Image (spheres, rainbow, N blue to C red):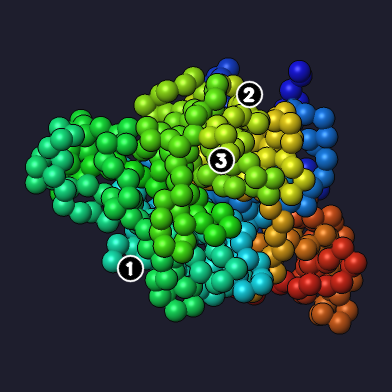
Amino acid sequence: MAYRRVWTRALAATGLVLAAAGCTGDSTEGDEPAEPVAWDFVTRPDLTPPRIDITDVGEGAGEASSALVLLGVKDQREKGAPMNGPVIVDAAGAPVWINPQGDTRWTYDLRVQQYRGAPVLTWWRGDTSEYGYGEGEFVLMDQRYREIATVTTPETHADFHDMTLTEDGTALLISYPVVEQDLSDLGGPAEGYLRDSVVHEIDVATGREVFRWSALDNIPLSDSEAEIDPDEGESGTEEAPYDPYHFNSVTEDDDALLVSARNTHAVYRVLREDGGLDWILGGRSSDFEMADGAYFAWQHDAERQDDGTITLFDNQAAPAIGEQSRGLRLDVDEASGEATIVTEYLPPDGRLSESQGNLEQLADGSVFIGWGSQPFYSHYDADGELLRDAELAGGISYRAYLDEWVGRPAERPKLTIADGRGHASWNGATEVAQWRFVAGYDADSAETVAVVDRDGFETSAEMPDAAYLAVEALDAEGEVLATARPGAWP
C-alpha cells in the first residue's frame, strides 16, 4: 500500500509562518536544514505547539472532517516538546486552541465530556514524579474556555491517569496513597511502603466523596507483575514505595465500574452497590480463559462498548512482553468464561509504547488510538485497517482523542500588522470561516481590503497604510463574530 505524506505547511495566502521555534544548531554547507519542531505565529509568538506530520493511508482518510484532535502536549525535557499544555488541532494537524502551562506545570488527558448536559473540556494539571505519578486536579472548561469547576481527591490529590464524568455530576478519579506494608514475602523490607491504588467517585459541585475502592483491600499482592527493584526506583521504602497495582482507568459499566490495573495485567469489574469484585479479566487470577492472542500486558484505558465488547490499549511493555503495542477489542463471554479477540489495531511500524496510551471508540465504528510514550496518534476503520497516522514533531501526549468541539472564546481575536501585512488569529475559535480585512480613515469609512478563507491558526493579507485598520472574523453565513484592531488586545 502506498503512503501519501502530507506535511502541515501553510499556503502563502494564509500568511502562516512556520519558522522554527525551539530548534537549535546551524546547518553546514550542503546539509538539509532541520525541520522545525514548533509552529511560529506573528500574532501569538507566545504560542508554540508542536508541528504534526500526517500520513494518509486508507481510502477516504483525506476526506474533510470537522472533528478535532485533542492532545495534552508534554515532556519538554525527555521528548523535546516545545511547550507543556492542552492543544487542539484540526484533521490536517493545524492548531485550533493552545493553552501553554509553563515549564513546570504538566498537562494530561484533554478531552470532551458532558457536565450537567453541556459539553466541557476536561484536563489534568499538577505536579508529576519521574516514576509515573501525579498530584493535582482536573479542570472543567466551558465552550468559552472559562474554568467552571475543578475536582480532585481527598488526602492525596488526584492522579493524572483518568477522570470520567458521569450523568450524575460525579467524577471517577484515581489516587496513589502511600501506606506501610510488610513486603518481606516479595523480597522487600518488613517495614516497607507501597502505593495503594484507589478509585474515588467525587461529586464535582461539592467535592464530596460518594464511593471509594482500594486495590490493597481487594487484590492480593501476589497478583502483581511488578517487582521490587531498587535499581528501577522501587525499593519498597518510604522514599521509593513499591507499586503493585497502578490503576490507570476507571469507566462505567452499567451498575459497575471497569478498572484497569497496569501492574497486574488485569481489568476488574467492581460492583458500585457494595464494592464487590464481580470478575477479573486477564492477569494471574483471571476468571476468563484468554484465547489465542487475547492476553494483554501493562495495558491502559479499558472500556465497555455498546456492542458488549471491551476495548483497551495493550502496551505489551515495559518490560517488553511482545514486539509491538496494539489496540485490542475483546469479546468477554461470561457464560463460557472465555475472552477472544474481535479486532486488533496494529501500528504501521511495529512501535512499542512503554507507557501511557488509549483507544477511543467513535460513533461510526472507527477507532482512534493515542500511542502514549510514542509520539503518534492513529485512526482506524471499523475493521482495524489504518486510515491515518500522525506524528508529533516534539513531545508526546499521554492520550489522544478525536471529537467534535465548538469553541467560542471569551478572549478576543488578535490583529498584528507586520511588513505591510495584517495577520489575524483567534485562539480556540472553531466557527471562523473567513477573515475580512478592512481599512479606511475611520470605522465608518473603512472598506474591504480582502476576504480570505481561514486555513489554519493564522491568516494574513496585504494591508494599506491607513488610519483605521481592522479584521472581522466571519462565520459560514458571513456574519461577523468579532472584530480586532492592532494594539487592542487582549
Residue extending furthest toward the bottom: 444
Q: Is 31 above or below relative to 124?
A: above
Q: Which mark is residue 348?
A: 2
Task: Pick whichever, 135 or 330, lies toward us.
Answer: 330
Asked if the residues shown at circle 2 and circle 1 are in contact, with their CB atoms under 8 angstroms apart, the answer is no
Can residue 9 be seen here? The reply is: no
Residue 331 in percent (x, y) is at 62, 36
Q: CA distance from mark 2 to mark 1?
A: 42 Å
Q: Which residue is mark 3?
A: 334
Residue at disc 1, secondary structure: loop
**Regarding mark 3 in the picture, which secondary structure is present there?**
loop
Left or right of 441 in this view: 394: left
Disc 3 vs disc 2: which is toward the camera? 3
Q: Quadrant of the C terminus?
A: bottom right
Can see residue 169? yes
Q: Residue at 83% of width from left, 40% of height from top? A: 63
Residue at horizontal 43%, vertical 59%? 173
The reply to whether the C-beta atoms of the residues labelled 3 and 2 are less than 8 Å apart is no
| Residue at mark 1 | 154
